[in-house]
Each structure stands twice: as structure tokens, then as C-alpha cells.
Image: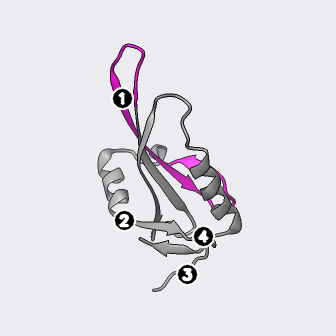
Amino acid sequence: MRNRYKLTKEQIQSMYDHLEGLAFADKRKRNSLKMFYHMDTPKDVYVKYTSYGVEPDNSIYSEETIECIKPDGSKMNCATQFDNLKQKMQFDSGLLEIDLDAKGNLIFV
């Protein structure tokens, strides 16, 4: 069975807005920013990145963030949808990296 879905203008705009809004004003660093598609949820796109920083006590922290962008452009944190690490790993294995060209067209990386 072949599924077809076209990203909405709201989704594309939300993807651009989300990427622009990820500039950190403090000393945190963002790494490995990528956008993804998952065939089990064809109407959603995902933004995944890791951020690093130094706490006031001089300890280092890292945080992986996966956010879902819905067809209406709304965003949600995807971490809340997994009950355990096995579910998260299974979901991660089905992610296909995507990007947008200058005209807002979807391309697979």
C-alpha cells in the first residue's frame, strides 16, 4: 500500500520558524539538528537536536529534544509519547531524514 501526503504551508512555515527560534542567547550549544519524516505518522514532521551547556556549578549537561510539527503548524514534545526506551528506539529506527529546499520543497537527505 502506498501512502501519499503533502506537507501543509502551516507545517513548512512552522519548520522555518522553529529552526530560526533555536538560537540560544546563553552559552548552550545546539548540535546535530535534523528534520525527519516517519512513515507511521505521515502527517507529522520531526525536528531532533541535542543541546549542551554548563550549569552554574560548572557541571555539563546534555539534552536530546525531539519535537513533532503537526499539519496545523503546532508543535509538541515527542518524548512524552514513549513509555520506555525500547519504544523510543523503535520509533527512532523508522525516522527518515528530510530537508527543505529554498522554495519550501521537501527533499530526502
Res 57 seen here: yes
Residue 71 visible within the image: no
* Numbered mark located on residue 4 in the image: 3
**Start-end of magenta stretch:** 53-77
Residue drawn at (45%, 32%), measured in percent from left and top?
28
The quadrant of the picture occupied by the C terminus is: bottom left
Residue 37: x and y, percent? 47, 66
Secondary-structure class at tag 1: strand
Residue at position x 50%, y 57% from top?
46
Foreground residue among 25 and 44: 25
Compute the Cα span from label 1 to label 2: 27 Å
Q: Relative to 95, does residue 106 appear above or below in the rendering? A: below
Closer to us: mark 1 or mark 3?
1
Q: Is residue 100 above or below residue 50?
A: below
- Mark 1 lies on residue: 61
Q: Residues within 10 Å of mark 4 (few under 14, many from 20)?
A: few
Mark 2 lies on residue:
94
Q: Work out whether mark 2 precedes mark 4 in sequence or the reverse, and give the earlier one.
A: 2
Q: Decide if residue 21 is on the left or right side of residue 54.
A: right
Q: Which residue is located at x 65 percent, y 52 percent?
A: 17
Report the amino acid beneath label 3.
Arg
Disc 4 marks a residue whose amino acid type is: Ala
Q: Separation of disc 4 and disc 1 at Cα?
A: 34 Å
Work out how far the residue at label 1 is from the one at label 3, CA to CA, in angstroms.
40 Å
Query: Residue 6 versus residue 22: which sits nearer the camera?
Result: 22
Relative to 46, say whether 25 is above or below. Answer: above
Q: Residue 15 sits in which quadrant?
A: bottom right
Which image quarter is the N terminus in? bottom left
